[in-house]
Amino acid sequence: MQIDLVIPWVDGDDSAHRRKRQKWAALEGIKDTEARYRNNDELRFLLRSVEQYWPFEGTIFIVTDSQKPSWLNLNHSRIKLVDHKDFIPEQYLPTFNPKAIDANLHRIPGLGERYVVMNDDMFFSRPVEWTDLFDGGCTFRMTHDSLPDEDSAEL
C-alpha cells in the first residue's frame, strides 16, 4: 500500500531565512516570533520513527522554503525535498503562513492519492496500521491512546 508522508519543515537557525521572514513580517505589519521556527532536530527523530514504524511504501516529501537539512541524504530513494515555489503559485510567495502552505500541499508534483501530513515535531512510537489512518475506506482518521489518570496505578 502506498501512502506518502508530507512534512513541512523550516530551519529557524538559518540566518538568510530569518532575514527574509523578518523583512516580510515588517512589510505586512505581522508580529514574528522566533519560537515558532526553533529547530531542535525534530525532523531527524521523525524520520527515524518513520523508518522504524511506518510500513507503507510511498515518498516522504519534506516541504521547505529554499532550505535543506545539512545531514539529509537526498539520494535516499524515498525522500524528496520540495520547495514552496514548486507547488505554491508565484503570486502567493513568499509565505510563512502554515495555513497557506497546507492549503497548497495537494499541488506537490508526484504526490500520491493517499498522503498524511505531519509536523516535524510529531513521531511514531509503535507500528502504524492501515486502520490507524483510515476507517475501512478512504476516510482519514487518527487515533491515540489516552494518557492514564494521575490516580491510576498505570503510572
Image (cartoon, rainbow, N blue to C red):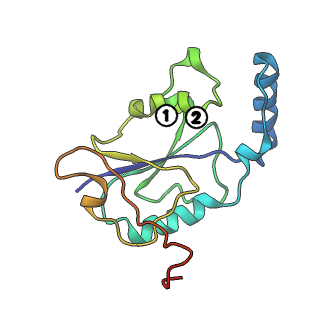
User: Dot 2 lies on which element?
Assistant: helix
Residue 145 left/right relative to 88: left
**Image quarter hosting the C terminus:** bottom right
14 up-or-down from 124: above or below = above
User: Dot 1 lies on which element?
Assistant: helix
Q: Amino acid at mark 2?
A: Pro
Q: x and y percent of residue 68 in the render?
A: 63, 48
Q: Residue at x 50, y 85 (%)?
A: 153
How far separated are the C-alphas under marks 1 and 2? 6 Å
- Badge 2 crowding class, 10 Å Cα cut-off, few under 14, some 14 to 19, many 20 or more, is few
Q: x and y percent of residue 89 in the render?
A: 51, 19
Q: Which mark is residue 98?
A: 2
Q: x and y percent of residue 85 in the render?
A: 55, 28
Q: Amino acid at mark 1?
A: Asp
Taking the view exactly as shown, the residue that stands out farthest to the top is 91
Taking the view exactly as shown, the residue that stands out farthest to the bottom is 153
**Along the line of sight, which residue is nearer the eye, 136 or 96?**
136
Q: Are marks 1 and 2 in contact (CB under 8 Å)?
A: yes
Q: x and y percent of residue 39 in the render?
A: 71, 54
132 up-or-down from 48: above or below = above
**Image quarter hosting the N terminus:** bottom left
Residue 119 left/right relative to 36: left
Residue 12 left/right relative to 136: right
In the rendered image, which residue does mark 1 sit on?
Answer: 102
